[in-house]
Image: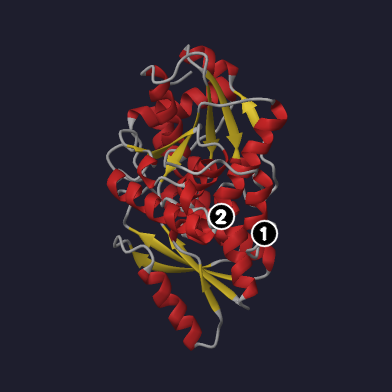
Amino acid sequence: MSAASIDPEDLLARLDRFPRVALCQVPTPIEAMPRLTARLNGPALFVKRDDLTGLAFGGNKLRKLEYLLGEAIARGADCVVTGGVPQSNHVRQTAAACAKLGLDCHAMAMAGRVRKASEAYITSGNVLITHLTGATLHEATWSGERNAELHALAERLAEAGRTPYVVPYGGSNALGALGAVHCAVELMQQLRAKEMDIAAMVHCSGSGGTQAGLAVGLAALAPEIKLIGFDIDAEPDRVAADVRRIAQETAALLGLDGHLDANTIDVRAGYAGPAYGVMARETLEAIQLGATSEALMTDPVYSGKGLAGLIGLVRAGVFSKSDRLLFLHTSGTPGLFAYAPELISMVPPG
């Protein structure tokens, strides 16, 4: 049995105990999607535009970085270590945040996770922006050990006299998840101001921190809102386990253990395609529907798969037409350029 919901101001006070730097342009807007709603003949659809948080094309990772880099600065770090695949949205946003804050960024570029990568994949999109914002890239081969290489690099930098701070893969740990808790507070304040309620919030879920933080925030503020994360890694069991672990650690960090029921963490499979970074038919359709209905740009790796999941739920009749559903757009827009050859070949001529 979950504890009674708390006031947003109470949760903000708990969040204020942690160092934080301002990186995001917030609140991000909530927009209606009437044309997509009509095309799907379903519940009223809305989108929260976390692709508009600012800094080098924005995205949800900036919310995590406000707390992670806040701690880095509080600890006296002079450089930041993180990593991801070449088209990592997280690395792009970390590099941009470090440039803004005057910190050196060392990013581990983990090749090999996405097989048969095109030239565009390894030179454009996120990796181009990461280069432009001054990050130092260190090459590595994807092994599935997401953070081991990062700590090894940090040790080498420390031996060279630097003071590194490690931002984990995807920014996904309890501290980073505080950014998503803050997003939940922001959302509830917006809904209250609009005198609006929603039945569910849906988004893509990979490294787990965003879903974990949202789960903690909504459990504390509005447990009646269903939160659904769509696995984009084609590893739903691993994603769900990570979300549960990070959510429990985040709740403990905020003294909210009694509010979170980790058994209600909802990670859905079926929209990831055959592997991480590979488009399924549903992904391409979602990208096209979002673009042609609402001029909403979603990417093949993350937000496109999340939107595909939302479309799938509507078509399956999971919600009634009287419901309101909210899609959290976590960005990934630069990834469209990295997949341009594939997208152009798959999109029929107009």
> Which image quarter is the N terminus in?
top left
Residue type pointed to by label 1: Asp
Residue at coordinates 63% horizontally, 57% vertically from top-left? 14
* Residue sitting nearer the eye, 224 or 226: 224
Q: Which residue is mark 1?
A: 16
Residue type pointed to by label 2: Leu
* Residue sitting nearer the eye, 194 or 41: 194
Q: Decide which of tag 2 and tag 1 comes sooner along the chain.
A: 1
Quarter of image, res 196: top right
Check disc 2: other Cα within 10 Å, few if <14, some if 14-19, many if 20+. Answer: many
- On screen, residue 243 above or below 187: below
Select label 2 or label 1 by which is in front: 1
Is residue 332 at all visible to an observer of this figure?
no
Q: Which residue is mark 2?
A: 178
Check disc 1: other Cα within 10 Å, few if <14, some if 14-19, many if 20+. Answer: few
**In the drawing, does residue 332 fall left or right of residue 78?**
left
Is residue 221 at all visible to an observer of this figure?
yes
Quarter of image, res 228: top left
**Secondary structure under the numbered disc 2 in the rendered image:** helix
Residue at coordinates 50% horizontally, 17% vertically from top-left? 43
* Residue sitting nearer the eye, 245 or 70: 245
Tell me how far mark 2 sits from mark 1, CA to CA. 10 Å
Residue 334 position, x and y percent, is: 53, 45
Residue 8 position, x and y percent, is: 65, 44
Residue 320 position, x and y percent, is: 45, 15
